[in-house]
Amino acid sequence: MSDTVLVYRGKEIAAYGFGDPHPFGTDRHDVFHTELDQAGLSAGVSYGHPRPALVDELALFHTAEYIDKVSRLSAEGTGFLDEGDTPAMPGIYDSASAVVGAVLCAVDEVMHGNHKRAFVPIAGLHHAGRDHAAGFCVFNDCGVAAEYLRKQFGVQRIAYVDIDAHHGDGMFYGFEEDPDLIFADIHEDGRYLYPGTGAAEETGIGRAKGTKLNIPLAPGADDSDFHQAWSQVEAFLEAAKPEFILMQCGADSLEGDPITHLCWTEEAHAFAAAALCRLADKHCQGRIIGTGGGGYNRHNLARAWTRVVQSFVETR
């Protein structure tokens, strides 16, 4: 097993975005990698390159009808994939499938024992549902990865941990009845921010009741509020004893993001990543993958994601 953290880069995932003036621009990949290159972590990092996900892999989470819709509208290159947040850009099918493919490559590397930890910056597209796009998200890479872990490797009990400012509704509702998808999400209260979901009372349904943890925070919540919430997340995950951890580390929860209202610093991301690595070492044979998620202040996302990688390196 390599002692390095595997970080993904490449023009295929960099291409995922919606152009100016959309907040999810295609510059986000290079802004992060420039910061990472300057962080003095080169001895602890190696690089992976994405491949496109196959249709059958996308279909592990998404419906065939929805996959066909994305393919068709991507070829047409006009209109929207949802109600107006996610444009049907020319080629968006290819870049969205590359995002999923990068995460599946990371799963393969980790599960085959080549690396314990991996990070994919342009990923964590947590709003996409099984049959729809939403909130800048076309295909839900973490949703596909969870189903892929089960089908390819027999890993059943998967923890999905989300610290993006927005509630990970695509993951929550996609697995709301699944007792083995352990879901923990700290986010801005949905009464003040898209998508308006993720109330504390939403804990799963049926056999899955109690396997989902939503912690909404008020606008203006800072690092001290994050740490208070994080103690609940850590106890929840400790009790759940997952076999694999997927981390969505959206940087739009940092102060100064143009479309959200939380006030964390990148120290919250560094702390959460280190804590999850310790849990992964205890319960998951070290296996954790981080995904970048949201973040629309470029300085914030570069620093927050770099601090996640740094924590992965320092706890490897």
Image (cartoon, grey):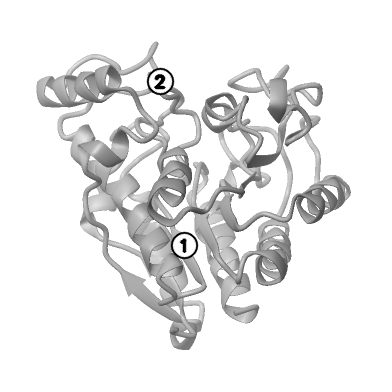
- Residue at the spot of label 2: 85
**Residue at horizontal 36 percent and vertical 28 percent from the top:** 62
Whether residue 22 can be seen here? yes
Image location of residue 166, percent across then percent down: 61, 32
Of the residues shown, which amino acid type is indicated by label 1? Phe
Q: Quadrant of residue 107?
A: bottom left
- Residue at the spot of label 1: 119
Whether residue 205 can be seen here? no
Image location of residue 162, percent across then percent down: 63, 44
Q: How many marks?
A: 2
Of the residues shown, which amino acid type is indicated by label 2? Asp
Mark earlier in primary sequence (1, 2): 2
Q: Is residue 122 left or right of residue 298?
A: left
Q: Is residue 233 left or right of residue 283?
A: right
> Mark 2: which secondary structure?
loop
Image location of residue 27, percent across then percent down: 33, 50
Query: Above or below — where is 233 with respect to 315?
Result: above
- Name the one closer to the observer, 184 or 229: 184
**Residue at horizontal 60 percent and vertical 66 percent from the top:** 307
Q: Is residue 76 left or right of residue 127?
A: left
**Residue at horizontal 29 percent and vertical 16 percent from the top:** 80
Q: Quadrant of residue 268?
A: bottom right
Q: Quadrant of residue 234?
A: bottom right
Q: Residue furthest front?
A: 154
Query: Above or below — where is 131 with respect to 91?
Result: above
